Amino acid sequence: MKYLEFKNAVKEFPIISLTHISNINKKPQTLKVQLSGWQKKGLVIKLKRGLYILNESDRKIEPSRIFLANALYSPSYVSTTYAFGYYDLIPEKVEDVTSITTKKTAKFTNTFGTFIYQHLKTNLFFGLKEIKDENGFPVLIAEPEKAMLDFIYLNLQDFKGKEKDVFSLSYRFQNLNILKKKKLNDFAKRYESKEIFDVVKNLLSFIKEER
């Protein structure tokens, strides 16, 4: 298969998976060998094993980093620090895309950056919502309250025994008034942890003082 033929067959896709490859060629193994050669020439970019994208000049769609985060490792949803940046809960620009998954912890680095996945048990895989990215594709991201609770849960040792000013001094949180008290409490109950509740209590007290 010639590269031009391949490009025309996949240019409408934001990413190229092994499923796409199998559908456009009766000899997928042969095409995989060709993919390796096209990678060396810079025509195709490997995102991870079995997932590719056309080079910047040839691809029709520029996938968003949230879309890529969902696609690289599934099931997953964007959360913690990258979600904080999305919701403007912190002033810093977040480079690494952080996600939650029910699979084992993982990390992928490619031309689009670093994608980090932290494991949570299946019963804590909730509090996410579907939004549309800049291309109009549906993507999954934590609600702001769930992003905060995921972060607290995964960094609990940094919050235990600390006063409420930890939210402004250590992490420089901002715009915390967008967090809904009832939803924070309801979500916190599902973690079944007194320590989580104590941190959330401090957080709500801090938010009240900041208003």
Image (tube, rainbow, N blue to C red):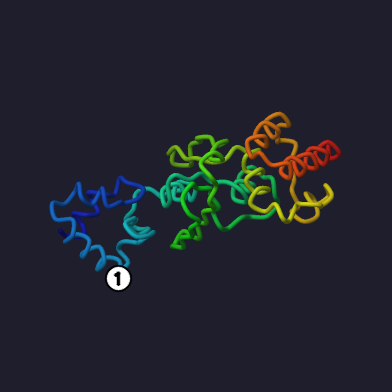
The x and y percentages for residue 189 are: 67, 34
Q: Is residue 198 above or below residue 104?
A: above
Residue in the picture at 51% in, 54% down: 117
The x and y percentages for residue 128 are: 54, 37
- Is 207 situated left or right of 90 in this image? right
Q: Is residue 195 above or below residue 132?
A: below
Asked if one can make out residue 175 in the rendered structure from this viewpoint, the answer is no
Quarter occupied by residue 180:
top right
Residue in the picture at 54% in, 46% down: 78
- Is 103 situated left or right of 32 in this image? right
The answer to which of 65 and 100 lies nearer the viewer is 100
The x and y percentages for residue 52 are: 33, 57
Question: Residue pushed farthest right?
Answer: 209
Question: Residue pushed farthest left?
Answer: 26
Quarter of the image where the N terminus is located: bottom left
Amino acid type, mark 1: Lys
Asked if one can make out residue 162 in the rendered structure from this viewpoint, the answer is yes
Quarter of the image where the C terminus is located: top right
Q: Which residue is mark 1?
A: 40
- Is 109 situated left or right of 166 in this image? left
Residue in the picture at 65% in, 48% down: 153
